[in-house]
Amino acid sequence: MKVAASWQRRWWALVALTAAAVLLLGVMISLAVSIGEIAIPVATTAKAVSNRLFGTAFELSRIHEGVIWDYRLSRALAAASAGASLALCGAILQALLRNPLAEPYVLGISAGASTGAVCVMILGLGYGVLSLSGGAFIGAVVAFLLVGILATGTGGSSERIILCGVAGSQLFNALTSYIVTTSANAEQARGVLFWLLGSMSGVRWPDVYLSVPIAIAGFAACQFHARALDAFAFGSDAAASLGVAVRRVQIVLFGITAIMTAAVVSMVGSIGFVGLVIPHAARFIVGPSHSRLLPATALGGAIFMVGADIVSRIIITQQILPIGVVTALFGAPAFAIILYRVGRSA
């Protein structure tokens, strides 16, 4: 009876925490739509959404309705999906590699996606057939394969995979810089630099239609493998002894990570620290079990990214900072704390 009562209390606490996180995400999205050079009340936002989705006939200013629907709401939803995707990628990579410092940026996947996107933007590769998202995906896959080949050749331990990822990241960052320096004019170089630091300025509804389904499908696939990810906490050999198809799970989850990262990079550029910090914060709150950790990580990443987008628009008057700068300002101190804790544990 005591065990059942304890389990029931934990279950209700988890439900309450999830409901609070969803409510907080809704509040953050409402604030993201309302805050800006043109202040818009939350009630006006609700009326504009109701007019578009449910065919109501609330009287609204055309300027307000255009700003809400065509600019701010799509931006907020894209930020939420990007944050959820990056945070999930970090949680998956940390579990598969058994390394608390693993994330798409560290493993070179983001850098490879950036190089692929820049090849399409500046060099025109694909001759109009290959989209920016397609170029980013190809770059992410190439970076993933390169890091995998290097890691396999050097033993395949998690530490060596991280080191190979850092080397791959430097390589693709150098290629991106070379392409921008030699092939872009001043205006293109400025636009690419701002985009690479993480920019939500160009996000519109087509980006939402791409990023949100990918984030939802990626979350569902990762949640399906939650028990397998728990088994990886004891190592690949232990996971195999527990009946996990280690190679298949690794291929599937690494592939999902590459797809989600490519989608985010093609939409908003390369953003670091989200996939590193948010999984640790979620793990501290809900524990290490991935059936609870993955939903908490996705919601935490979405909330964090929407909040970072709000800060990027209000921290300097009449100027928008790249969102990657804001995430780095918060993420770098957290990264230092994680390094310190890892060192103390070792």
Image (cartoon, helix red, strand yellow):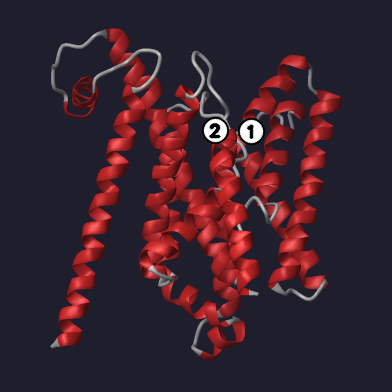
Q: Is residue 131 visible?
A: no
Q: Which residue is mark 1?
A: 197
- Image quarter of the N terminus: bottom left
SS label for mark 2 = helix
Estimate the spatial distance between the alpha carbons at disc 2 and disc 1, rounded to whole Å. 7 Å
- Label 2–label 1 contact, CB within 8 A: yes
**Type of amino acid at the residue the image marks with label 2:** Ile
Q: Quickly name the residue at label 2.
A: 323
Q: Residue furthest bottom?
A: 241
Q: Position of residue 251 (x, y in %)?
A: 60, 68
Task: Give me the residue at 36% from left, 16% from top.
Answer: 67
Observer-nearest residue: 87 or 252? Answer: 87
Residue at (72, 53) in percent of width and height:
143
Front-most of residues 331 and 153: 331
The structure residue drawn at horizontal position 29% and vertical position 13%, both measured from the top left corner, is 64
- In this rendering, the answer to whether 178 lies above or below 343 is above
Which amino acid lies under the numbered mark 1 shown in the image of this protein? Leu
Q: Is residue 208 visible?
A: yes
